[in-house]
Each structure stands twice: as C-alpha cells, then as structure tokens.
Amino acid sequence: MYPTFTRTKNYMQELSSLPGSVADSIPTLDKQLDSFFDRNAEAVIDEWGLVTDDDLRHLKQKLEFLSYEVERLVVEKSNLEKRTSDLKLAIEELEKKV
C-alpha cells in the first residue's frame, strides 16, 4: 500500500477531535434551503401567496359567520314569502268587496 504521511495522520486526528460530526459542518442543499426559509419565511409566504394557519383560522371564522347569515336570510326569505302571500290574499278579499 501507499505510505501515510505524518501530515495526513495529524489531519485525520484533527477531524476526529472536532465537536459534533463532520456531516454537521458540511454545507448541503437541505441546510441552505432551511436557512434561507428561516430567514425569509414571511417574504416567501407573501410572494408565493401561501396560506398560513392564521389565514385559515380567519377564513374559517368568516365561513362560519357567512353560513350563519345565509341560514338567517333563508329563514327571513320564507317569512317574507308568507307575508307576501298573506298580503295578496288580503288584497284579493278587498277587491271582491269593492
């Protein structure tokens, strides 16, 4: 085999004495992306039009309110239709008397 120089042995010893693993200190695309998104999360959300949990909560509240309003309007519509029908009958009775 090839001889190992003292300089190489020292380098290998220095690598093994580093705190943590070597993999932690090697830059990777995943780490760079995570770091980028951590720094620019709000800008990315705004630019890409992403929906946050707060947005979803707000939309859910709006939907619940609108659903309530629609149900209320449907009930009111049926009440108005009944009143209209009663008024038509009353008008017809008055016209018969005249």
Image (cartoon, helix red, strand yellow):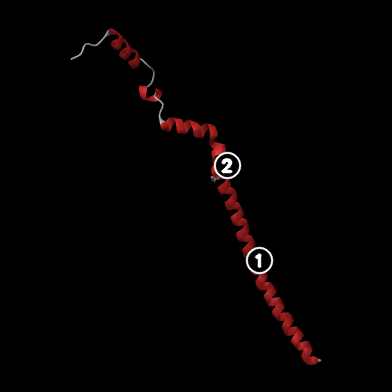
The residue under the point 28% across, 8% down is 6
- Against 4, is 22 above or below? below
Q: Is residue 21 at all visible to an observer of this figure?
A: no
According to the image, label 2 marks what residue?
Answer: 46
Which residue is outermost to the front?
Answer: 2
Report the quarter where the C terminus lies. Answer: bottom right
- Where's residue 10, x and y in %? 31, 10
Horizontal arrangement in the rendering, residue 73 relative to residue 25 (left or right): right
Horizontal arrangement in the rendering, residue 39 relative to residue 94 (left or right): left
Which residue is outermost to the top?
Answer: 6
Label 1's element?
Answer: helix
Q: What numbered label is drawn on residue 59?
A: none
Give the label, 2 or 1, closer to the camera.
Answer: 2
- Where's residue 62, x and y in %? 61, 54
Mark 2 residue type:
Asp
- Where's residue 97, x and y in %? 80, 91
Which residue is outermost to the left?
Answer: 1
Q: In the figure, residue 14 lies in which quadrant?
A: top left
Q: Earlier in the sequence, mark 2 or mark 1?
A: 2
Q: Residues within 10 Å of mark 2 (few under 14, many from 20)?
A: few
Inter-mark Cα distance, 2 to 1 = 36 Å
- Where's residue 78, x and y in %? 65, 73
Report the quarter where the N terminus lies. Answer: top left
The residue under the point 39% across, 18% down is 19
Horizontal arrangement in the rendering, residue 96 relative to residue 22 (left or right): right
- Against 12, is 63 above or below? below
Which one is in front, 83 or 40? Answer: 40
Q: In the figure, residue 68 lies in which quadrant?
A: bottom right
According to the image, label 1 marks what residue?
Answer: 73
